[in-house]
Amino acid sequence: MSLSDRRVQNLYWSISENYDRKYQGDPAFYVIGERAFLDLVFPKNQLENFIKRNTQFLSNQEDLRKVIEIAAKDWIRDSFLRVRPGMAVHEGGHYEGLFQDLDRMRKRSFSQEMDYQYSRHRTGRPLTPGPILSPLLEDIFSLKTCKDSKDFFQGIIGILKKFFHVNAEFVSEDIVVELKDLGQDEEVKKKKKRRIVEEKIREEDFESEEIESAEFTNVKRDRPEEGALEEPGIQVASKGEEKTFKRIVMHFGNQDLLQGRQAELERIISRGIHKGMKLHLTRGNFEKDMNSRFFEDQILLQRQANLEAFEKDQHHYRRAIFELREILRKNLFDDFDQSQWRTSRGEVDPQEVWKYYAYGEKNIFNKKYFDRDGSFSVDILLDMSASQQERQEEVAIQGFLITEALVELGIPTRVMGFCNLFNYQILRLFRDYKDDKRQNMEIFSYKASGSNRDGYALRYVFETMKEIQAENQVLIVLSDGRPNDQIHIIGGSNQEVANYEDEEAVYDTAGEVLQGRIRNKAILGVFTGQDQDLDQEKLIFGHDFVRITDLSRFSTVVGKYLKSVIERI
Amino acid sequence: MNRFELIDFIKKQGVEEALLNRVEDFVRENPIDEAYKDRVPESLFAYYGKEIWTKALHGILSGYHILLSGPKATGKNVLSENLAQVFNRPLWNISLNVNSDSGALLGGKTFKAGEVVLEKGPVTLAAQEGGFAIFDEINMAKNESLSVVHSALDYRGIIDIPGYKRVKLSKATRFIGTMNYGYMGTRELNEALISRFLVIDMPILQGDSLALILREETRLREDKIDLFVRLLMDLQNKSLQGEISSKSVDIRGLFAALKMMEGGLALLPALEMGIINKSFDQFEREIVEDLILTLFSKDQDPGELFR
């Protein structure tokens, strides 16, 4: 029986009763069960530690491992089948298969011979060991009488000494836990947490940032903090509009907006501080030339890193998605849309009373019902500016978690990343409202670069939200509360577009959020920045933002706040 | 189980005699109207747990309403029904949902003989007749709907029904709320409502309590009881870990499945109906079925399970 990973893990967790450990072995039903039970009987890696401690530096460590493992399996067998009698059916199949595989072999190594003899034993066949193996197997089977794991380890120590001249030792459980297992486990747990809340800057991030910056600015610099950009003597090559557009396409992929639509949208939203801004909506389809290839590869590399980070802790993330989905299901679908029906009881409608006297009509009362199918659409906007480079994986994963939960509920969800280059607002469309669920994986192609004009991106989203018919429209913005687009420094060709920085940028963004609320959109900020920017985030979103510091509470926090902002529509 | 058997059962669990004597005094002081005698429940199951019984009895005897909070399968409904029987009160059970409005609680106006009259709702009846009213899944209802009973639940003890009159709460009336708080998908109760209840946090059912129930209520063989207890504990654990929803953690479903097995239905189809299929998510079903298959063989003879 081939099992999906989720089933494999759940089977392991059910039997081992340890939901923190991930099973990585053979995905066969019986093997998982047996391994899980071994881990239940020998908690905190006791067996594995014993094996490692006593065999690690020996040339025949594989053989010794096999002897110890078979002894352990034999010792737990009866209890295993007593506690999990259903496994008896699978036991036969497993050992029969093992026997058949090994029986065909002409020559078997020591470990294989041990497996072979043991499979004969478990399938009820007579044993055929040579004069050397016979007493060894007898001694192994005699361990069955051991009452507890300490006895069992003492027995094993005797066997290793008698047959392999190995002076094994058993360190008492407490010491084992303290010195090796527990310490290791705790460390792993801490690491996991840290990875989620405080991502470290990897060296390649710096490298990629340098390469990219040099490409799009034509400015060579050593480190961003050296302030080279602000020196007056920098040579900035002036680009024509067409050349700029080509660069944009090279960096982010082809334009997906039709020209007419683009012009129309720009006419509506490129006003005020954003005057002169252009839109570039892309799904990340690149040209086939070498330069584009370079940028595409950069994105693919980041995608790989994002996916790796996700897969590393996939089970916790899947749980978070499941929980968020359930919270949203209850909270989003329960409250909306009241409708009124005429019934024979409830609140009397005075205007209808005459009907009773005229025709005996009894349905002259009103009763209120809440429809559960209040329609929703959700937009998720990911800040894709370079300031997010330190936590790209984190942002991609958080975006993915929310999207998965929403899409599983059948809520039309659009996910976009936004950043700026020159006078272009790049909107990377990861998934559109009606895309297939598989498209959610595109969110892992999130890569941070460039600057950001949050207010302009918000204008675009509010303007295009009209495309989907939904009674309740929700926008979730994952950003670091630092809108910044110092366009005059890096560009040069677009002097007509105003700089977007400091207070002005924050107030513009806050203004757009307010505009959205006035237009009855529910807006929630998910803060993905640093402590010192919290005040700005608060200024932009008011009280409607969340900061996730512990992913185990991600679903509860996001679910709860999302509910509260929607309630206020 | 009649009232005396139930009281005996509570005594056996170690609940103080003096407390039960106070219950008897309460029953004596609050005779029940003949017309509502058939509303006094006769419990099929009894709640196990001295501590919870003691808390609940004290709460009710002191004149307060109680809120039973805990995840699924912790015996909230069994305890509320038991309480009504022990105190010999007529019981009104109100299953709340998002569509429950004040009319569903207090009653609505209707026409009788050409006149608009009030058809009393369960809360009004319980208030007048000294009954117990259970607000089942209280956190499923909208807080606005429940606000109409705020005045009944606090020191005022009255319900003011617009267009009718003020109904004074009988001194024997108690409201018992049940809720599944802090679990996936439940809503927040507002503080005004919570403050009107004494809250009892129902402990998650432990293996030995479940074994006791299975021993008392079914004819399962002793060695098989352990397996069914393990099944439910594993499911409960899995649900608390967020791997599956609570739909399959279903004691009622387990009892129904056992009943069908006793009637001759094979184990897996019976558990499918009672437990596995309670979830409509294919992944979840597979996980639950895998778990069952670690405990029972597919072709388990149902006859062998029972004494």
Image (cartoon, rainbow, N blue to C red):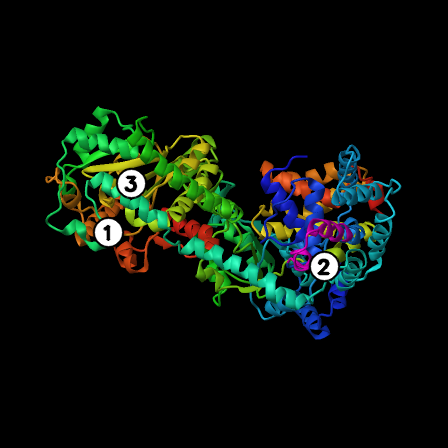
Which residues, given as a range, are shown in magenta? A45-71
The numbered mark at residue B92 is none
The numbered mark at residue B209 is 2
Please say whether residue A55 is one of the residues in the magenta stretch. Answer: yes
The numbered mark at residue A224 is 1
Please, is residue A196 above or below residue A97 in the view? below
For mark 1, name the chain. Answer: A
To the question of a shared chain for discs 1 and 2, the answer is no
Image x and y of residue A442, in percent:
40, 35
Residue B109 visible to an observer of this rendering: no
Separation (CA) of disc 3 from disc 1: 22 Å
Of labels 3 and 1, the one closer to you: 1
For mark 2, name the chain. Answer: B
Q: Amino acid at mark 3?
A: Phe
Q: Amino acid at mark 2?
A: Ser
Of labels 3 and 2, the one closer to you: 3
Image x and y of residue A23, in percent:
61, 47
Image x and y of residue B192, in percent:
44, 62
Please say whether residue B219 is one of the residues in the magenta stretch. Answer: no
Main SS of the magenta part reads helix
Separation (CA) of disc 1 from disc 2: 66 Å
Q: Residues within 10 Å of mark 2 (few under 14, many from 20)?
A: some
Q: Secondary structure at mark 1?
A: helix
Of labels 1 and 2, the one closer to you: 1
* Among the two numbered marks 3 and 1 on one chain, the one whose residue lies closer to the N terminus: 1
B217 and B173: which is toward the camera? B217
Q: Amino acid at mark 1?
A: Pro
Read off the residue under disc 3.
A418
